[in-house]
Image: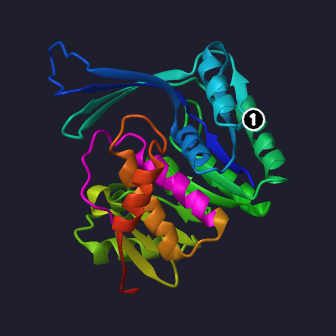
Amino acid sequence: MRIVSITLNPALDLTGQLNELVVDSVNLVDQADLTPGGKGINVARVLADMGTKSTVSGWLGSENQDPFVHLFSAIDAKDEFLRQEGTTRTNVKLAEVNGRVTDINFPGMAIDHQAVQRMEKKLVELAQDHEWFVLAGSLPRGVSPTLYQRWIELLNQHGAKVIFDSSGDAFSYGLEASPYLVKPNDHELAQWVGHDLPDESAIVAAARQLITKGITHVLVSRGSKGVIWVSAEQVVKAQPPKMNVVSTVGAGDSMVAAMAHALTQGWDVTKSVTYATAVSALAVTQVSVGISDQSKLESLIQQVQVCELPNT
């Protein structure tokens, strides 16, 4: 079973590690890495390390597509990206030893109505033989923030299950279409409900508002505090061990990939949320995206603490 992972606004990610970023000064980078990125592409990379194959799609600039093509081949992802004239954007991420990450995101290609129609046709085509879809990341220039909402509704009509991870207006509109699972972080969830979420009970209450909109699962990521999974039947909290944070880049995408993998395997909630928490915890200990050490992941799985919270 291949999972379709959609990235509408991919990027070449230039990630640099340095001791401390000093504004208005020359900064020396200790280590650098240039890789094809974007939330959905990161998800596909992590899925490959889990042994789950993916189909990747979205929009790519034809002028600098080679690194993406090479990556898709390396991870055995089926390439269904639509090519556009121009270049895919470059993003710069500066990761400090204290775990702080500074993102410098450049504008992507402008997408016109014709390209949107082509992509919509591609989604319908993919829905004929794929059940699971991951829609993740920001929208490119020229695209309405309502696009995810329309496409989630379209995929629901074709019997697909959508895992959705975005932010801002695109996230808010997408929620209206009742995706199967959403993964906001606590800040994004607070922004959606319009007030702070000072404790776990407030997070659960906000997540339950999403459940009432027809969303089956809400997974709220909370950084070092772990995650809270909310469904109609139960609420589960998972706490990772204390990690030596190198970079938080890709941690959320790793969690989405782990959840997609767990759901397609038919795992129960406890096993799924434990696995997703461990995969995300492993991600913060490295600069690159992916599962670099399977034995370390197995150790982390054993260290994740899981408990049920009141389902009120």
* Residue at 59 percent of width and 21 percent of height: 67
Residue 150 in view: no
User: How many numbered dots are placed on residues in this image?
Assistant: 1
Kind of residue at badge 1: Glu
Question: SS at mark 1?
Answer: loop
> Is residue 271 positioned above or below 92 on the image?
below
> Dot 1: few (<14), some (14–19), or many (≥20) neighbours within 10 Å?
some
Q: Position of residue 217 (x, y in %)?
A: 53, 70
> Is residue 247 positioned above or below 91 on the image?
below
Outermost residue, front direction?
Answer: 295
Residue 108 in view: yes
* Residue at 32 percent of width and 44 percent of height: 285
Q: Coloring scheme of the render?
A: rainbow
Q: Is residue 254 magenta?
A: yes
Q: Nearer the viewer, residue 13 or 89?
A: 13
Q: Is residue 231 left or right of residue 299?
A: right
Q: Nearer the viewer, residue 222 or 139?
A: 222
**Magenta extent:** 239-263
- Residue 109, quarter of picture: top right
- Residue 310, quarter of picture: bottom left
Q: Is residue 265 left or right of residue 21?
A: right
Q: Nearer the viewer, residue 42 or 159?
A: 42
> Is residue 90 positioned above or below 190 on the image?
above
Q: Is residue 223 magenta?
A: no
* Residue at 79 percent of width and 47 percent of height: 126
The C terminus appears in which quarter of the rendering? bottom left
Q: Position of residue 211 (x, y in %)?
A: 51, 74
Q: Position of residue 15 (x, y in %)?
A: 37, 26
Q: Nearer the viewer, residue 293 or 72?
A: 293
* Residue at 24 percent of width and 72 percent of height: 199
Q: Position of residue 93 (x, y in %)?
A: 35, 29
Which residue was labeled with disc 1?
80
